[in-house]
Amino acid sequence: MSGDPEQDYFADGMVEEIITELSRFKGLFVIARNSSFTYKGKPVDIKQVGRELGVLYVLEGSVRKSGQRVRITGQLIEAATGAHLWADKFEGELQDAFDLQDKVTMSVVGAIAPRLVYAEVERVKRTPPDKWDAYDLYLRGISLYGERNEEANAQALILFRKAIDLKPEFATAYTRAAACLAMKPTYGGLALTEEERTEAIRFNDRALALEPTDAFVLAWASLIFAFTIGDMERGSDYVDQALAINPNLSNAWTARAWITLCTGEAGELEQGLEAFNRAIRLNPFDDRTVFIALRGKCFTLWALFRYPDALEQTKKLIARAPNDLYAWFIRWAIEADPTIKLRHPQLRISDLRKLFVEPIRNLPRRALLEEVIERLGLPE
């Protein structure tokens, strides 16, 4: 928009980067450069673009140069309605063109990928349930899964199973079903039954067989191996694969952080904390990502003996989920707040050990957690 043809290279490079990184998300159908560039520099009708390219959403933006300062704007639009789903702007120095491109690309991709999922969820809600296909069931399951409570999680699992029944090759539906089972103990504290554990592993194995190079599938596989099966080394290998395929996937950074929390020494915990923060930066509008990262930050800060900071994170968690087991456990660990027993009267020492102690490889940290759990005075 500056009118300077010499700056075209910067805008073109920006588009190339964003297309490349969005294409790493296998769940997104992204139009290639040659087709999208035919609209460059022209006044366009978004609805017409949607029809001509056969897409539901359009990302458009501009680059404006003033001296050595560059302002980049972007907005995501629903093609059929023209509704704006997301907009942001970024500024920086042209001398640092490549750094600026990286920063903008990471921010745009991190914001858009979850926005598109939520837009699709809202679209499904406008469709009568009797007309839902496997993908619609899957999206409705994602919506319920994001409510972060035991009842909604159980309902989401039912929908993912139905999606699998309708479409047995639906890899991410298997992954989501496995995730529902893996997350179940984190809501009420009760450990998985052997039948549930076996089913989670079966779902995970099937997803990997169907999509062995999908970063989302690999990221969740890392968590299933690490926390459901107890194989931290294999879990770490899978998350490394996920990040190599898609370094902008917030789920993968969250998985990396949790595994680091369980396996790392004091110096590595700081790296885990940065990985949690990176997941939030990549996906700041996704409540689920932020929630899981906040849980991890609570524990990491506690493990680093940064108690005031850990307590501050528990406040953020409780504001999002008043009964959150992780938040109240950390509050008990730091200041003996007995609310955890009031909020979760069904808790048993054996279940808390499986959830909080068994994954930890650091022996002094394990011993401290054992002591914290014993002080609760719960039945075995």
Image: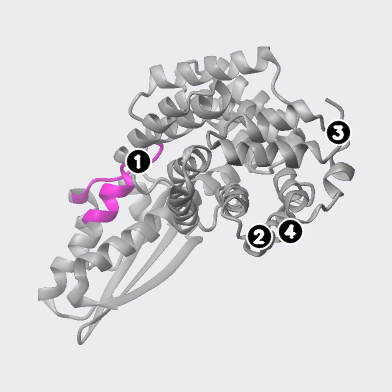
Q: Which of marks 4 and 2 is nearer the N terminus?
A: 2
Residue beneath disc 1: 243
In the image, 317 versus 144, the foreground residue is: 317
Q: Earlier in the sequence, mark 4 or mark 1?
A: 1
Image height of 34 relative to 136, above or below: below
Q: Are marks 2 and 1 in contact (CB under 8 Å)?
A: no
Residue beneath disc 4: 319
**Quadrant location, the C terminus:** top right
80 in magenta: no
Q: What residue type is labelled 2?
A: Tyr
Number of disc labels: 4
Which of the 4 image quarters holds residue 70?
bottom left
Residue beneath disc 3: 378
Identify the element where label 4 is drawn.
helix
Residue beneath disc 2: 307
Left or right of residue 11: residue 217: right
30 in magenta: yes
Mark 4 and mark 1: span between their CA atoms?
Answer: 31 Å
> Looking at the image, which residue sits at the far bottom?
67
Write the residue at 58% across / 30% down: 179
Identify the element where label 1 is drawn.
helix
Q: Earlier in the sequence, mark 4 or mark 3?
A: 4
Q: Do the residues labelled 2 and 3 touch (CB within 8 Å)?
A: no
User: Which marked residue is nearer to the observer: mark 3 or mark 1?
Assistant: 3
**Quadrant location, the N terminus:** bottom left
